[in-house]
Structures are given as structure tokens and as C-alpha cells.
């Protein structure tokens, strides 16, 4: 896992855009996308470029269960608002939060991912080490599945809802194995709230207790952060 630290947010996000452009220039056509506050400045920057995704396919990592695509906090809505309306892809897939049968839905999504293997995957990280919505303890062999969100994840994401009660309790997420199949992975860990988890990620062994440590066995992962190494740490 390579780590690049930036003192300027603008440089960090410019580097992220450049990494995506480079992947595209090298032939990437299938992109795994992420949501969350961390990704908003990235998508804003992408929208200001002339990058053309019209021959590419996108897959989102996850979606809340129970929210319609028109709900302002659904990840479908987020993606349209921040990226896809301005930069349309040939096709864009997300899990369907309103699917009637979770087993059918997760098999459908995983089938699509296997049909269109990911060339590139963008990741944020949760404060508990989750990637996508793979909470601590998730098997590293997991495929797309239904998860019950940890209370800490609901609390962390409550800032986007008018109250904690509105935050869904379940979500669909690509599994760790689904994510690990991507040829190239770019993880962004931005802001003080991510300091502790970034340190844990970099210091931990390969452990399902910290889902993001699965990435340590991936041959092509880049982590971008604005967090500097703490000096004189005892
Ligand atoms: C959510 C998403 C993750 C995201 C994480 C961090 O739980 N499911 O994919 O990486 O939150 O979000 P933020 O960037 O808002 O801190």
C-alpha cells in the first residue's frame, strides 16, 4: 500500500483526478465509485474537467436499504447530483435499496460485477475501518451482501439526515472480495476524524477487525491523505 501525504487539499484532490485520468488513459473503462463527504470535492473537480466517461461503466460500492433513488440521502441521488448528471457513463449501476428479495439483489449485483470486472475502485474509509459498508468482522471472502450497520456508522452518517432515526439500519455493499478484484484501488482518508483509523490501518496486520487492512494484500493500492505523520510520537 503506497501512501501519499498532502499539505494542501487542492493538491490531494488534483492528484486523485490525475490518477483517475491516468487509469483511463491506460484503458480503464469500469470504475467503482464511492460516496460520502470525502468524495464531494473530488467529484466537483472531475466535473470541471473535460474527462469523458461516456464509454465507461460505473458501479457504486453500496446503497442504503429502504431509500428510493429519489430520496436525497440515497446514494443513487448523491451520485446523480455530484457526478453522473454532469458526467454521464454508458451505464451506471448501484444496488437497489428497494429490492424485494435481498438474496436476489445481491446475486444480481455481484453477477454484474463479475460480468464487468472493475479496472479501478475508489474508496473512502469509515472511522471504524469499514470500506464500502463492510463493517468490522466482515469476512475477507465476502461478496456483495446485505449488512446491518454498526451504531457508530449510523451516528457518523447522521449528519446527512435530519435525525438519527432517519438513518437506515441496513445497506447493500460490495463485499471485500468484490472490492479486492479491482485492478487498481485509490483510497482517500481526509480530515482529522480519520486520523485514528488511518493510523490503525497502517499499523495493523491483515485482520478482519479492520476491514480496510484487506487492502494490504492488494498489489496496486494508493492511499491519499491530508494527515501528516505525527512527529515525536512516543
Ligand atoms: C459511508 C460509505 C463509505 C464511505 C464512508 C466515509 O459509510 N458507505 O463508502 O467511505 O462513509 O464517508 P465520509 O467520506 O463521509 O467520511
Image (tube, helix red, strand yellow):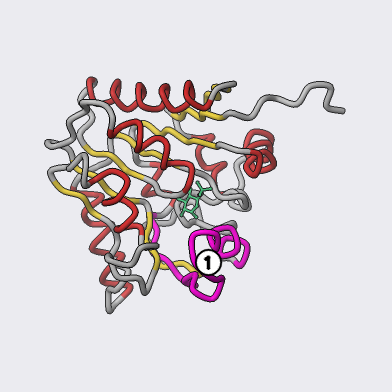
Question: Is 127 on the left or on the right of 185, as rendered?
Answer: right
Would residue 42 be counted in the magenta stretch?
A: no
Q: Which residue does the image show at 31% across and 32% down from the upper left?
A: 46
Q: Which residue does the image show at 41% across and 42% down from the upper left?
A: 40
Where in the figure is residue 38, as x and y percent of width and height?
A: 48, 42
In the image, residue 11 above or below residue 163:
above
Would residue 154 be counted in the magenta stretch?
A: yes
In the image, residue 230 above or below residue 40:
above
- Point out the residue furthest to the bottom here: 100
Question: Is 205 on the left or on the right of 96, as rendered?
Answer: right
Where in the figure is residue 120, as x and y percent of width and height?
A: 32, 35
Judging depth in this view, the residue of 160 and 153 nearest the camera is 160
In the image, residue 136 above or below residue 226:
below
Asked which quadrant contains residue 69, the reply is: bottom left
- Give the SS element for disc 1: loop
CB of residue at label 1: within 8 Å of ligand 1?
yes
Q: Mark 1 Cα within 10 Å, few/some/many (few <14, many 20+)?
A: some
Q: Which residue does the image show at 19% across and 43% down from the upper left?
A: 57
Residue position for label 1 = 149
Where in the figure is residue 234, as x and y percent of width and height?
A: 87, 28
Where in the figure is residue 58, as x and y percent of width and height?
A: 24, 45
> How many numbered marks does the figure carry?
1
Q: Which residue does the image show at 55% across and 24% down from the upper left?
A: 3
Q: Please provide the residue range marked out in magenta.
A: 151-174
Amino acid at each position: 500500500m503506497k501512501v501519499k501525504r498532502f499539505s494542501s487539499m487542492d493538491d490531494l484532490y488534483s492528484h486523485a483526478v490525475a490518477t483517475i485520468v491516468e487509469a483511463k488513459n491506460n484503458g480503464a473503462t469500469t470504475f467503482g465509485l464511492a460516496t460520502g463527504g470525502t468524495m464531494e470535492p473530488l467529484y466537483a473537480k472531475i466535473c470541471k474537467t473535460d474527462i469523458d466517461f461516456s464509454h465507461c461503466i460505473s458501479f457504486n460500492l453500496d446503497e442504503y436499504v429502504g431509500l428510493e433513488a429519489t430520496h436525497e440521502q440515497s446514494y443513487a441521488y448523491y451520485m446523480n447530483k455530484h457526478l453522473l448528471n454532469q458526467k454521464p457513463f454508458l451505464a451506471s449501476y448501484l444496488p437497489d435499496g428497494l429490492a424485494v428479495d435481498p438474496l436476489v439483489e445481491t446475486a444480481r449485483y455481484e453477477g454484474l460485477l463479475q460480468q464487468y470486472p472493475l479496472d479501478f475502485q475508489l474508496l473512502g474509509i469509515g472511522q471504524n475501518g469499514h470500506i464500502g459498508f463492510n463493517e468490522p468482522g466482515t469476512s475477507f471472502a465476502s461478496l456483495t451482501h446485505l449488512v446491518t450497520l454498526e451504531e457508530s456508522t449510523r451516528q457518523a452518517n447522521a449528519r446527512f439526515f435530519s435525525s438519527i432515526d432517519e438513518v437506515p439500519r441496513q445497506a447493500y455493499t460490495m463485499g471485500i472480495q468484490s472490492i479486492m478484484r479491482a485492478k487498481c484501488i485509490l483510497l482517500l482518508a481526509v480530515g482529522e476524524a480519520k486520523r485514528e483509523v488511518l493510523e490503525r490501518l497502517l499499523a495493523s496486520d491483515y485482520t478482519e477487525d479492520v476491514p480496510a487492512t484487506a487492502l494490504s494484500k492488494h498489489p496496486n493500492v494508493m492511499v491519499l491523505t491530508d494527515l501528516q505523520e505525527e512527529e515525536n510520537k512516543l
